[in-house]
Image (cartoon, rainbow, N blue to C red):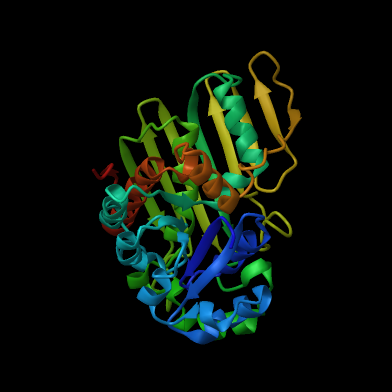
Amino acid sequence: MARHRVLGISFDHIHMGDLLRLVADHPDAEIAGIYDPDPARMQSAISNFAIPPERVFTDLDACLATPGADLAIVCSKTGEHANTVERIAPHGLNVLVEKPFAASVADARRMIGAMENTGKRLAINWPLAWYPSHNTAKRLVDEGRIGDVIEVHFYDGNRGPLFHLADKVDVSPEEVERQKPGSWWYKKAAGGGSLLDYLGYGTTLGTWFLDGEAPIEVSCMIDETPGIEVDQHSITVCRYARGLSKFETRWGTLTDPWTQQPQPKCGFVLVGTDGSIASYDYDDHVTLQTRSNPSHTKIPVDVLPPGRRAPIEYVLARLDDGAPITGPLDPAFCLTGQRIIDSAVLSATTKRTVPLVP
């Protein structure tokens, strides 16, 4: 038996397959059980990872009772995150929730509250947190290379959530259109839409770049497409005590950034009092410009050390060494990001600038 036994809870989010692969590849971990009410959605994982029948569950409580399990990965639809974490908490498991954090600040606080007195960890996985480019940008910020950060510019998205399966397997445009009417990604009540899908990336990592600072007020506009009840494009502007920042989400880019960066490029531009850093998804460098050297300087990205390269190895390393969950996975940073998201939703609904929700 491996030192860490991991459960996969719900296959609503296609990232479950990617996370289970990280478990299967980890030398000290094993897939102890998987759960989904629909057996068909688990078949690919069962085949890919040779999961035996006794580790496959359609009853959540039976899966959570798996002997020796110590970590549950949650990939339920966003609107179910709070309910799912509340179901898991009494079983004494650590929890890794696949982004987004939650459908609302109230749900996020329910999740934090459910785990608070269990003695177990709660972590939120934002895949951008593992990109060497963004980690390099954060190191340069912490070194004071651009002075104090006063602006965060974020643009990110993809062709749409139905265009790819686990391991980035492509889905045809015809199949995407067939799936849209029944997909939770396109249902408001389930937490669908590009804003909830992608804004948390920008606001959570943005809060990390800003050392935890929260904005004063938020203004957001979303697109309105006939026949689609959720947004596919959003632009959020935040006013901080020291400047304005912009966060843009998009479903419908010409290409996916992991195959060919669209235009605008997906990633961040950080502006400081003494310089700026361009940090784009998947790039092998960041671009630094400073007041003392205004030429664009390409800096190769850092090589991330073991235990800091991917979510499963990171969380398991923290379980082993007892160190706290930090950075974009820390629920405290994520809660500030969620407050910005809720404010953006309120602003887009009321069509006015709003104070940051408490």
Quarter occupied by residue 285: top right
- From what the image shows, is residue 124 above or below residue 43? above
- From what the image shows, is residue 13 above or below residue 271? below
Furthest residue toward top: 292
Work out whether residue 358 can be spotted. Answer: yes
Q: Position of residue 315 (x, y in %)?
A: 52, 48
- From what the image shows, is residue 135 above or below residue 309? above
Q: Is residue 61 left or right of residue 41?
A: left
- Residue closest to the eye, 122 or 239: 122
Q: Residue at x 63, y 16 (%)?
A: 291
- Residue closest to the eye, 313 or 222: 313
Q: Position of residue 145 (x, y in %)?
A: 61, 20
Q: Residue at x 25, y 55 (%)?
A: 106
Q: Residue at x 46, y 62 (%)?
A: 68
Task: Give the quadrant of the C terminus.
Answer: top left
Quarter occupied by residue 1: bottom right
